[in-house]
Image (spheres, rainbow, N blue to C red):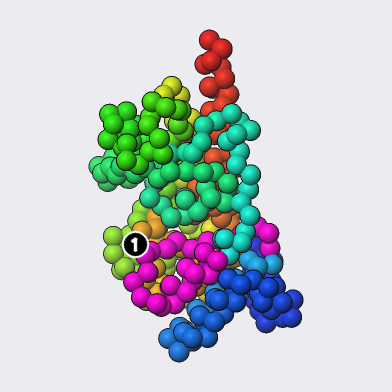
């Protein structure tokens, strides 16, 4: 992580990076947008995005992505989204692991999370979004349940509700083809942040988000994320949990949340108010014990392990 940050800050206007940047038509468009909007975008934001784009242009593997909202104006946030989109389009995804495992495709994703969709895209896993929300606050005991148990409880409740909706025919419009015509793998997940022995979910206010982030200076937060896979029509299910701990530098500013809010970033949609993938936050990171995709809401390693486990269980059931 430190070496990555040093590369980001070493020289964003070097000849090597500028040559690569000019070679990409989408990146060139991004430069033009920055020039046109320079009067309205804070310099620190513009250069933070530039460092990010240069870094990703020089690497075959993306390091991070941004959570996004639908753009409401042609602002700094819009430009950041464009930068993320342009580099995603030029970064080849990994090979889809489903055919090699003999598993059906596409996956039915029971999550509205932008970052979970982005991570599946990076993994080369095709998916169709089929979301049926539940009342998460009514489930589990935040004061007593261990975090890993809580996130599994929530992810399994989402799965049970979604599978019931699918089986009872209330998701036909969202399915790529009729349920009766093929098999499906359904994926749901959940995530909480733990800090100072407390479970933190999505902040209910900007003030609560400020309190969360202020505490991260002295108490490193950890993300606890679950993933549940269910095969239809067999109902065979596998699940698991992955954790990561984030260490911030003491330089994390008191107004970080306000800076993100000013850019229309969805801080209240993130567990613990954490947006480590955002350039404004990323520059204050020391290290992550774990993987960035796990912090962002879906561990790639966990997904691959669960797919393998699901294949083995399906193979065993077919032999019976």
Does residue 218 appear left or right of residue 9 in this picture? left
Label 1: which secondary element: helix
Asked which quadrant contains residue 268, the reply is: bottom left
Asked which quadrant contains residue 41, the reply is: bottom left
Residue 198, can we see it?
A: no
The magenta stretch spans which residues?
Answer: 59-86
Q: Who is closer to the viewer here, 253 or 177? A: 177
Residue at 49%, 86% in the rendered image: 36
Indicate the position of residue 276 as horizontal and vertical percent values.
Answer: 50, 63
The residue that disc 1 covers is 268
| Residue 297, above or below 101 | below
Q: Residue reaching furthest top?
A: 320
Residue at 58%, 47% in the rendered image: 123
Indicate the position of residue 22 as horizontal and vertical percent values.
Answer: 66, 77
Asked if the magenta segment contains residue 245, the reply would be no
Q: Residue reaching furthest right?
A: 16
Magenta highlight: main SS: loop
């Amino acid at each position: 992580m430190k070496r990555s940050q040093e590369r980001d800050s070493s020289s964003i206007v070097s000849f090597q990076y500028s040559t690569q940047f000019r070679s990409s038509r989408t990146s060139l468009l991004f430069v033009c947008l920055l020039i046109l909007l320079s009067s309205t975008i804070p310099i620190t934001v513009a250069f933070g995005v530039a460092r990010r784009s240069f870094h990703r242009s020089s690497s075959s593997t993306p390091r991070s992505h941004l959570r996004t909202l639908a753009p409401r104006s042609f602002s700094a946030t819009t430009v950041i989204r464009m930068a993320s989109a342009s580099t995603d389009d030029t970064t080849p995804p990994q090979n889809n692991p489903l055919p090699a495992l003999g598993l059906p495709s596409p996956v039915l994703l029971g999550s509205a999370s932008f970052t979970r969709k982005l991570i599946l895209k990076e993994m080369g896993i095709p998916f169709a979004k089929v979301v049926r929300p539940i009342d998460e606050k009514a489930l589990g005991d935040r004061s007593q349940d261990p975090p890993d148990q809580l996130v599994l409880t929530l992810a399994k409740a989402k799965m049970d509700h979604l599978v019931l909706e699918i089986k009872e025919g209330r998701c036909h419009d969202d399915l790529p083809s009729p349920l009766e015509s093929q098999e499906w793998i359904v994926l749901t997940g959940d995530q909480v942040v733990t800090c100072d022995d407390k479970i933190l979910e999505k902040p209910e206010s900007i003030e609560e988000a400020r309190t969360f982030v202020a505490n991260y200076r002295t108490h490193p937060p950890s993300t606890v994320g679950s993933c549940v896979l269910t095969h239809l029509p067999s109902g065979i299910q596998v699940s698991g949990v992955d954790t990561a701990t984030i260490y911030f530098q003491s330089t994390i500013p008191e107004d970080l949340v306000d800076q993100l809010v000013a850019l229309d970033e969805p801080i209240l949609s993130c567990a613990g108010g954490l947006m480590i993938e955002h350039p404004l936050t990323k520059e204050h990171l020391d290290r992550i014990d774990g993987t960035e995709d796990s912090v962002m809401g879906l561990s790639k390693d966990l997904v691959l392990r669960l797919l393998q486990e699901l294949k083995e269980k399906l193979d065993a059931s077919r032999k019976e």
